[in-house]
Amino acid sequence: MKALYVKYKPHYQTSLRLAIPVVISQLGHTLVQTADSVIIGHFAGTVPLAAVSLVNSIFTIVLVTGIGIAYGLTPLIAQENGRENYTECGKLLSNSLFINLISGIFLFVPVYFGLLTVIDRLGQSPEVVVLAKPFLGMLGFSIIPLMIFMAFKQFAEGLGFTKQAMMISIWGNVLNIILGIIFVKGMFGIAPMGVRGVGLSTLIDRVLMATVMGIYVFRSRHFKPYLKSFILRRISWIRSLKILKIGAPVAMQYTFEVSAFGGAAILMGTIGTVQQAAHQVAISLAAITYMMASGISAAAAVKAGNNFGKRDFAELRNSAISNYHIALAFMLGTAFIFIAFHSYLPWIYTSDPAVISIAAQLLIIAGLFQLFDGAQVVGLGILRGMGDVNIPTFITFLAYWIVGLPVGYLLGITLGLGANGIWMGLTLGLLVSALFLFMRFQALSKRLV
């Protein structure tokens, strides 16, 4: 162990310096939904919490699709920066802004005109659906400013500037929590808005985050050499296609995983409202650790892209393995927390004893899948930095939709194991994904070396 630590120590330090701000920034996306759940769970009750669970389970698919598309920019920026091709970086940002804006509109349209109609036909409790609809509409519109924010964020992070997006995410979440409480409870002369209140606070938060991140990128001296070639009107279809060739498969990778958990929430809703609310509590906690591991993955993608651009494949491999070590160590710690405090953590979200009882059981299972979740998301980041996205996309589809969700349905619904059975199936899907992605990385990196 000591020899291993000495070998990778320089890589641990470099990776952590890059990763920690990204981890906190990534955490911001999840904390928006976590704050919504906490505020509703304590100030509105179990039925509104179930409505938030239903909407977040559906909207998270839209969210990660958008984030995945935006991620197409980061490895390209990292690779061009590694080659010291600064002019190309500015041109890539122009195209990324265009793609993200169009993608945000295209993601909003099916939410507003499709999901708001389909939600009536998912077999959910009528009182849950009534509360869910306005919340889903506001979240759907918020994807547009979020995609603009992501374009600037991924550009800055691709160049190694990660702290600014972190600070904007932190203050954005503080604002979201304050506004959420004000709108939900009805303070300062505002009528109580319930679930709609957290939707409005999220929308305001994301508009302000996009504005501030854009101002930072255009005014910072760090980006002057890169922005000389930035002209928003000149869109190159070749560059746009390069971004989409990475971004679209990455979006599918995230979508396959998150939609499997979204499908699990719908299955929970067919069992009962309490089970659905418990699923929201447990998945909110698991999503926090997942997004933190996703931050390590994003930093790993930047380092892999940089080394890939320099054609330093030995350094690429060592850096990637160090990121695997960091993610596994982190997720081992969160696994211990989930298992040791499984009876206490649900109290953060709700005081309903029935919800807490089921959520506590799910957190034990969540503790078991932490290592698999961390390993698979870091594997995706490393391969993305290397430009390898198509085979990993197939792996994620196989893991979650051919293995995870069907096995969850079999155990939870057919064999009657309920919420626990559904989550056991999802755990198996994460294991399959982690194993196959690591095998893919090993084969590719050894071949390059």
Image: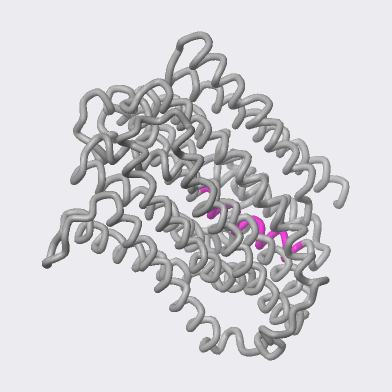
Looking at this view, name the residue that lies furthest to the right.
447
Horizontal and vertical percent position of residue 385: 72, 57
* Front residue of 315 and 310: 310
Horizontal and vertical percent position of residue 357: 28, 23
* Front residue of 127 and 336: 127
Magenta stretch: residue 295 in it? yes
Question: What is the quadrant of residue 281 in the picture?
Answer: top left
Q: Is residue 173 left or right of residue 266?
A: left
Question: What is the quadrant of residue 342 in the picture?
Answer: top left
| Residue visible at 77% across and 80% down in the picture | 85
Horizontal and vertical percent position of residue 50: 33, 36
Please tell me whether residue 37 is drawn above or below residue 245 in the rendered image: above
Q: Main secondary structure of the magenta part?
A: helix
Start and end of the magenta stretch?
293-307
| Residue visible at 28% across and 34% down in the picture | 346
Magenta stretch: residue 25 in it? no
| Residue visible at 53% across and 11% down in the picture | 414
